[in-house]
Amino acid sequence: MAELHRPHTGPPAPPTGFVAALRAAVRGETDFGPTARALTTMDASNYRRVPLGVLAPRDADDLAAALTVCREYGVPVVPRGGATSIAGQATGTGLVLDLTRHLNAILDVDPAARTATVQPGVVLDDLRAATAPHGLTFGPDPSTHSRCTLGGMIGNNACGAHSVAWGTTADNVRALEVVRYGGEVLRLEQTRGMGPDGVRGTSAHGPGRVGDASAHGPHGVRELIGAHLALLRTGYPRLPRRISGYALDALLPEHPGGPDPVRAFCGSEGTLAVVTEATVRLVETPRARALAVLGYADEAAAAEAAPGLLPFGPLTVEGMAADLVREPAGLPRGAAWLFVETGGATPAEARAHAERVLRSADAVDGTVVTDPAGQRALWRIREDAAGTATRMPDGSEAWPGWEDCAVPPGRLGPYLRDFRALLAQHALRGTPYGHFGEGCIHVRIDFDLLTPPGIARFRAFSEELADLVVAHGGSLSGEHGDGQARAELLPRMYGDELVALFGAFKDLWDPDGGLNPGILTRPAPLDTNLRFEVLPKRPVDVAFGYPQDGGDFAGAVRRCVGVAKCRTAAPPSGGTGVMCPSFRVTGEEEHSTRGRARLLHEMLAGEVITDGWRSTEVRDALDLCLSCKGCRSDCPVGVDMATYKAEFLHHHYKGRIRPAAHYALGRLPRWLRLAAPFARPLNALARVRPLAALAKRLAGIAPERTIPVLATETYSRWLRTRRDRGTRLLSSGRVVHLWADTFTEYLSPQVGRAAVRVLEEATGRTVLPPPPAGVCCGLTYVSTGQLDAARRVMRRTLDRFAPLPGHPVVVLEPSCAATLRTDLPELLPDDPRAAELAARVRTLAQYLEEYAPDWTPPRLDRPVVGQTHCHQHAVLGDAAERRLRERLGLTGELSGGCCGLAGNFGFEKGHWEVSVACAEERLLPAVRESEPGTELLADGFSCRTQLDQLGPPTGRRARHLAEVIAEGLEGGDGERSSRR
């Protein structure tokens, strides 16, 4: 094992006087500190470049002023939106322009004209939400639609799944206002494109000019085009997904309506000017949709079938192969599938279109899905592919770089066969998927980007694949742009003369070369600036086992590829997901899962974040991580920031004084065990406000919090007393092991009592008392990074707790169950008892489903509202709970997101505002809006406490599902009995 790598030199500093001049010229926020720089070193590509700093301009004037100062000091600029670019074009060595913080307004929606005017930082889903009431949408829809911005889509000429119907971004932008390097403002207007009905066509709106700009753009462009007409007329391949290079053929005079500067600008990857405003076309949204899912023998067969489906006028024709699908998820038979979406004025019409496709397709098997939930589940497989494809089925890493080549749709089948052969020739693996209807293929390949031989293979493969794409008449990029990944190879596609013309065009727009240098023209080599080369060459010494990453913490951090599913304004998965609550509250990159992963990456690199495990920048970013584990399940590549946070805190505070809350809350099981005999007087003292305030201040607890009430009789004492009073202990085959977690034992024993009632009624088995010495999963020690203590507690627990062979362990507290299931074996990987106990963990519902399948639960027949514990969602799943609630007659959905208390997080001083904001996102509004008589369900102690302390005064107490069932058993027919 190795210590953290430290380079001898750091990144360059800004020119003398530049920072002061910039701050004097702009009103937006500037940040040249290590956190801001570290957060923007990477996008979603393989590349890394360290910027000088970050500016969040307030408006277009701010942006123009900044570009004026940058030109004066020779500082390069890179515009940045959601930073989901896969080719490296959202990274740079100069000033990063964060266009998401302030330039994110939807300025106008004109339903009659079917247009919208937006600023570049508008997230696509926000635009779609604003236009949906008018029955309109923006046609291009990349899989990152929940976080990508319109500015980034214009820069990359993004497409998405529906481009077969509505075209690329260039087809859907009518006018642009842009600022050149140096501050000059130009307005460009599209003269050719799709009509308002959303069908590919032409319309003339007149050339746009501001100041001295011509219809072609800056001075000299018209003459450049005129001097190379023959080259421009013959040098471009004809295919729907040609994104590579500059679209100079859009400026040819024979285009209907005349030269089209907007189309020529789209796809320029931030190298010509910075967009400040865009007027985009909107298309009519089909009122109903259906999905024909067609199974084929292999991906080449699916690819060859795709062009034959286009005459049916589908909205999408997407394809993927079996090696991308981790679970069948209701797919028809086959080793590859086409997703063909159809629209209609009514559900019946949409279904009829889909069935017509199904009948006409020569598929092995197929089905038509009309249920919206079923369609969402299938589309989720496709949309998460950019992340899931980053890990091969055996867990090895795969990377972008040749993410989105495109060939003519009729050539896609032969191309895929040749592509697979080339992979085999280089002993590489990949999982192709993508827009089969337009010949565009996405793939992540298991390149070795860590060693010189692996990087050499990466280059050789890239060069040969470029030749293969060109041989099939294709484009090196069919969606995501060239960036650094492919720009070096553009001469293979276009020839040297046309590529030289690209350079001349760039120079007319940006003569100083200040906008995104090294991208598209005069590019950096594709095998330089790789983001992995700065990481330690050997694994660093860590506490967790990281079994999915070969025990390598750097490998765990590398999981984050930057697709930014954590940067969404609402929980993923239709509102039932969790990740990432702190980002949704603050809107700050450093409080997203991706941002924290970037900071950890830079901490390992040691170039920008130089203090290693002692880094205050990483500590501060992780401070607002709720350790909800939502990213473990919701992140497409399974980043587990809760574990990374615990690891960091373990090293950060090693041999140092910790925050008071770590001693008070991190060692809570110890204090509760000592306090249990004195519960009544301590409860009385806690009601004395001055004493409670003093205790909270000493313990590092938020002053706004109420200290929970201690149980006057612990769960284990109650159970032993009950047994001593005559409860018969059955044979060893008729017992239940119920885990006496800290929260059930000392704070909510009523949950344990209820669970005993339910388990014994349902199974006929006797619940065993816990060991006299007590047990603890170590949760609070883990969440505060006291990992040495956590391992001691866990080993002691394994010594004391020995369930009978083959018997599961029922755990009522979801966070404790998740700790036993994951943290226990990952902290004690060499102790076989840890893995054995982890495999035995069951929730109450899981146990009842497995061991009492014929039991008829009481019928309660009432609505429910509340919270699915975030750890349950992320680690344990709630399918069994859903089925049990259905059998009980408990109707309604529990909230996604996180309650905001999250164990120690919401109690710690300084976290009150974020904690409350998380609760206000989903949980508290759902409770306030619920009808009288609605049951409040929350299996987690944190969730119940948050509701008790923040919830509206409804007179209803949040309860564990066990309590609700037990009450139903007492009531016989499910009627409520009186509550104590």
Image (spheres, rainbow, N blue to C red):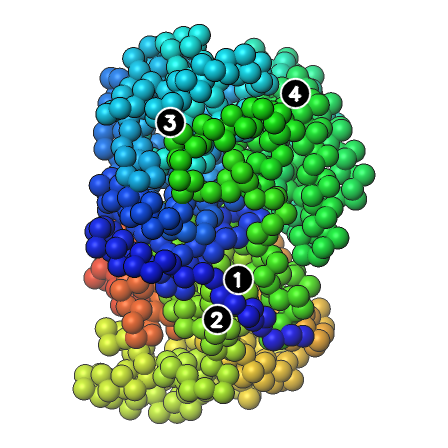
Quadrant location of the N terminus in the rendered image = bottom right
Give me the C-alpha separation between circle 2 and circle 4: 48 Å
Please report whichever mark, 4 or 3, sits nearer to the chain's N-terminal start. Answer: 3
Q: Which residue is mark 1?
A: 601
Residue 309 visible in the snapshot: yes
Please report whichever mark, 3 or 1, sits nearer to the chain's N-terminal start. Answer: 3
Q: Which residue is mark 3?
A: 138
Front: mark 4 or 3: 4
Q: Which residue is mark 2?
A: 610
Q: Looking at this view, name the residue that lies furthest to the right.
A: 425
Give me the C-alpha separation between circle 1 and circle 4: 39 Å
Q: Is residue 40 above or below residue 332?
A: below
Quadrant location of the C terminus in the rendered image = bottom left
Q: Is residue 85 above or below residue 36?
A: above
User: Around disc 1, counting alpha carbons within 10 Å, would you say few (fewer than 14), some (14 to 19), or many (20 or more)?
Assistant: many
Q: Is residue 210 above or below residue 20?
A: above
Element at label 3: loop
Q: Amino acid at mark 2?
A: Thr
Q: Residue at x 36, y 84 (%)?
A: 660
Q: Is residue 481 left or right of residue 294?
A: left
